[in-house]
């Protein structure tokens, strides 16, 4: 296992790892991984070890923007639209399933609750 770079070295580096981004931004690892998988946090992948490398400056800026937009109530789907991220077919299916579950009650079901039969 490689030795951790110092914070000073990381702050001067052009590219950083996800773990180093965690150290720089105090964001949770799982949050950064999620944003990466959703296409909201761009990265480059080095061929030799397949390590994801994030452009330090632009990644920190993107994370700050995302944090501000989320604080204003923007959903992940809205963030993806904002940044022009095209969802994969699998992600689209997941969104459709979530929407169907959320809106599965029919009008008749709602009327039964509001106007129960005598």
Image: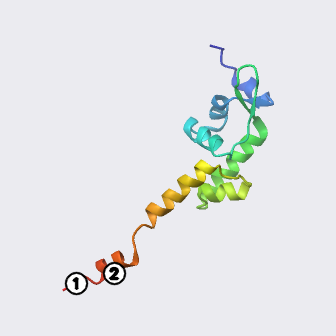
Which residue was labeled with disc 1? 117
Identify which residue is drawn at 18% across, 86% down.
118
Q: Secondary structure at mark 1?
A: loop
Q: Is residue 56 above or below residue 35?
A: above
Q: Earlier in the sequence, mark 1 or mark 2?
A: 2
Q: Secondary structure at mark 2?
A: helix
Residue 96 point in image, percent of width and height: 54, 59
Residue for point 61% across, 39% down: 32
For the view shown, which residue lies furthest in the bottom direction? 118
The image position of residue 33, as x and y in percent, is 60, 38
Residue designated by label 2 = 111
Q: Residue 24 appears in which quarter of the rendering?
A: top right
The residue nearer to you, when weighing 113 against 18, is 113
- The image quarter containing residue 43 is top right
Would you call the spot at circle 1 few (<14 residues within 10 Å), some (14-19), or many (20 or more)? few
Q: Residue at x 59, y 50 (%)?
A: 91
With respect to residue 81, does 14 lie above or below? Answer: above
- Return the residue nearer the eye: 16 or 37: 37
């Amino acid at each position: 296992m490689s030795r951790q770079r110092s914070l000073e070295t990381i702050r001067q580096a052009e590219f950083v790892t996800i773990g180093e981004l965690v150290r720089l931004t105090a964001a949770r690892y799982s949050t950064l991984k999620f944003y990466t998988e959703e296409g909201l946090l761009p990265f480059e992948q080095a061929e030799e070890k397949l390590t994801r490398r994030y452009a330090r400056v632009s990644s920190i800026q993107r994370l700050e923007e995302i944090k501000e937009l989320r604080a204003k109530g923007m959903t992940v789907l809205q963030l993806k639209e904002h940044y022009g991220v095209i969802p994969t077919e699998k992600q689209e299916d997941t969104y459709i399933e979530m929407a169907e579950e959320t809106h599965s009650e029919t009008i008749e079901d709602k009327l039964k609750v509001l106007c129960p039969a005598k």
